[in-house]
């Protein structure tokens, strides 16, 4: 039995750990950041970067108290390393929550289609899925995309603190992958 | 033989035993540091407690542009004001009221002792320990249930009136009441009795709405402020968005999913009853009637299910609280436990149907965020197993062992959710 099939079977039967993922052989990376690459290029560093908590390296993305939106990452679909336009996305990241009082906090993936068609807006509600605090937790969300996207459409990622009175949230090792 | 095999004293002792076990487990979990918070005047200052306390201290205030306390009904906050107690004090009074009503209800319904302990451990009952309306609602709903069961019209009237003054119960109760009267009136020689009970019930609900409207009219100048304020809590008629979600998170979702299941089951049973009624009206045979309190409980579950589905845009939060903390849940479980055993293949079918229902949460389509399909399957598989344990409880070979396992699990979950509530986490 090929190793990949065996892993798939194992994941199906015992796939109770976050390590079990769909096969990623055709995945391409649309957004990837461990937030380390800004050091040396900016002084002072952008406000969303901080060294208070980090899953890897020294820096992570932080949305502080009272802030409703974090910085937005933008790229066109044509600028990604994918060969064609993806039909499915998977957002994954590591988040650090100080407590359950973060209130509604969403990792948002948006495809801005510039009025050509309705924008695509999908959000991972962190407060619903993370139940361990003061430690890094991996989260992920799968997103289906329509067939009529255009290479000029803009992919955006940001953190939306819908209830800005909640506690801060840290995000690190962000990855958005796409599949045909 | 006394009801449920227990005398009145034994029923009281059983409740005392439950309180002792609850205290023992709670103190152990707290001392070992597994839970870190207990109810106190400070830790109970959470969520809707703010609004009830505001009404208790200052009366009603109304805003046409944002959330205000007029959305909450007056009986509990005015009872709190009258008591003069602090948050912990009123929380303890709530717990006492609930335990008294629960003991009375389960004694009168002749619920077996083990099942009483199991029902008393329902995790959603954490809301009986906080300054919320659940306990008072339970007391009055018990009165209306036992009024129906023992044919005491005064209890029925007072129960409905009390519920209607405690919460916006008339919205949920009116369809349930009409459905119950419809079926009851179809029984031979029961039409006049059913209509009388229906009329008295509607009078009680109308009176409760009238009293609330008068109080709010006097205090804020708007008699229907309680209805107008609902939109600021996002409660307005809208299409549900699938997959369903639960802002209370993964540790409350299973309870809300089970309440949703009960809502769907109640819809199915009520449709069956309506069909049977239609056949009877067309000249068919008179079918054996379900007790009116059971029909009312089913109707209540249907109303809550439809309200959650049509007024919360796909969010199922609160459905567990609205269903599991009421005597209607006790009535339905007690009724099921008194029925003859089902064939095991029926449970297989129910398990399969339940696993299909969980797709409403996107369990098998990668829409169940952060969980892989296998993980979601495991999560909902466990939820289904929990459900089947309740459904098949009366015919389980290892009933004592299963009851003990569920009892301890439920109480640990109760303390876990209570601790979350006391920390201002989202637990609804």
Image (spheres, coloured by chain):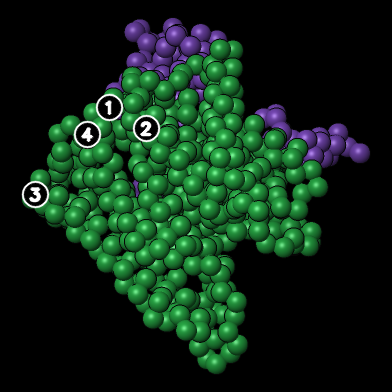
Q: Colour of chain B?
A: green
Q: Colour of chain A?
A: purple
* Residue that appears at 45% across and 80% down: B190
Which label is found at residue B85? Answer: 1
Question: Chain under label 1?
Answer: B
Distance Cα–Cα, label 2 vs label 1: 9 Å
Estimate the x, y position of residue B46 in percent, counting from the top left.
34, 28
Find the distance from the CA under tag 1 to the CA under tag 3. 26 Å
**Label located before the other in sequence (2 or 1):** 1
Q: Are marks 4 and 2 in contact (CB under 8 Å)?
A: no
Q: Is residue B340 left or right of residue B270?
A: right
Residue B425: x, y in percent? 43, 28
Q: Do badges 4 and 2 share one subunit?
A: yes
B260 versus B380 height, above or below? below
Q: Earlier in the sequence, mark 2 or mark 3?
A: 2
- Residue B218's disc number: 3
Q: Position of residue B39 (x, y in %)?
A: 41, 23
Tell me the distance, in whole angstroms, between the alpha carbons under discs 1 and 4: 8 Å
Q: Secondary structure at mark 2?
A: helix
Task: Name the mark nearer the viewer: 2 or 3.
Answer: 2
**Does residue A109 lie above or below B316 as drawn?**
above
Name the image quarter holding residue B264. Answer: bottom right
Q: Earlier in the sequence, mark 4 or mark 2?
A: 4
Q: Nearer the viewer, mark 1 or mark 3?
A: 1
Mark 4 / mark 3, whichever is N-terminal? 4
Asked if marks 1 and 3 touch (Cβ < 8 Å), the reply is no
Q: Chain of mark 3?
A: B
Chain name for mark 2: B
The residue carrying mark 4 is B81
């Amino acid at each position: 039995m090929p190793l990949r099939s065996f892993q798939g079977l194992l994941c199906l039967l015992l796939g109770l750990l976050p390590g079990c993922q769909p096969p990623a052989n055709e995945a391409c990376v649309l957004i990837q950041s461990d937030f380390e690459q800004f050091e040396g290029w900016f002084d002072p560093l952008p406000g969303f970067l901080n060294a208070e908590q980090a899953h890897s390296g020294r820096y992570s993305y932080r949305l502080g108290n009272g802030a409703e939106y974090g910085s937005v990452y933008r790229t066109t679909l044509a600028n990604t390393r994918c060969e064609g336009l993806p039909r499915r996305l998977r957002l994954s990241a590591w988040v650090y929550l100080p407590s359950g009082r973060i209130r509604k906090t969403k990792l948002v993936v948006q495809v801005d289609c510039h009025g050509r068609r309705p924008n695509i807006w999908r959000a991972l509600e962190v407060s619903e899925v993370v139940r361990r605090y003061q430690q890094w937790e991996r989260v992920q969300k799968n997103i289906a995309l329509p067939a009529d996207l255009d290479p000029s459409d803009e992919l955006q990622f940001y953190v939306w603190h819908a209830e800005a009175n909640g506690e801060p949230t840290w995000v690190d090792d962000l990855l958005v992958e796409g599949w045909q | 033989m006394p009801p449920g095999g227990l005398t009145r004293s034994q029923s009281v002792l059983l409740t005392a035993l439950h309180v002792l076990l609850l205290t023992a487990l709670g103190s152990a979990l707290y001392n070992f540091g597994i839970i870190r918070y207990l109810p106190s005047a400070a830790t109970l200052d959470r969520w809707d407690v703010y609004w009830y306390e505001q009404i208790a201290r200052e009366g009603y205030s109304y805003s046409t542009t944002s959330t205000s306390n007029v959305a909450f009904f007056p009986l509990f906050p005015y009872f709190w004001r009258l008591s003069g107690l602090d948050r912990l004090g009123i929380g303890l009074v709530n717990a006492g009221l609930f335990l008294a009503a629960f003991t009375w209800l389960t004694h009168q319904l002749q619920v077996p002792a083990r099942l009483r302990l199991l029902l008393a451990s329902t995790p959603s009952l954490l809301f009986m320990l906080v300054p919320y309306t659940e306990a008072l609602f339970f007391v009055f709903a018990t009165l209306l249930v036992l009024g129906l069961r023992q044919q005491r019209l005064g209890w029925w009237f007072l129960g409905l009136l009390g519920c209607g003054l405690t919460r916006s119960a008339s919205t949920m109760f009116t369809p349930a009441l009409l459905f119950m009267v419809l079926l009851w009136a179809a029984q031979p020689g029961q039409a006049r009795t059913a209509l009388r009970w229906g009329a008295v019930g509607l009078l009680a609900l109308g009176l409760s709405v009238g009293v609330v409207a008068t109080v709010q009219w006097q205090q804020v100048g708007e008699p229907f402020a309680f209805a107008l304020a609902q939109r600021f809590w996002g409660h307005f008629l809208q299409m549900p968005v699938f997959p369903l979600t639960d802002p209370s998170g993964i540790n409350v979702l299973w309870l809300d999913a089970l309440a949703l299941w009960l809502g769907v089951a109640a819809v199915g049973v009520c449709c069956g009853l309506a069909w049977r009624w239609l056949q009877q009206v067309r000249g068919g045979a008179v079918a054996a009637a379900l007790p009116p309190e059971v029909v009312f409980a089913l109707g209540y579950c249907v109303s809550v299910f439809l309200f959650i589905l049509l007024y919360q845009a796909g969010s199922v939060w609160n459905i567990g609280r609205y269903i599991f903390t009421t005597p209607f849940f006790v009535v339905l479980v007690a009724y099921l436990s008194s029925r003859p055993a089902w064939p095991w293949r029926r449970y297989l079918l129910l398990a399969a149907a339940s696993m299909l229902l969980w797709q409403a949460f996107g369990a098998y389509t990668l829409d169940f965020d952060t969980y892989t399909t296998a993980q979601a399957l495991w999560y909902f598989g466990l939820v289904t197993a929990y459900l089947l344990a309740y459904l098949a409880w009366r015919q389980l070979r290892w009933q004592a062992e299963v009851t003990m396992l569920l009892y301890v699990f439920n109480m640990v979950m109760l303390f876990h959710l209570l601790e979350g509530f006391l920390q201002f986490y989202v637990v609804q």
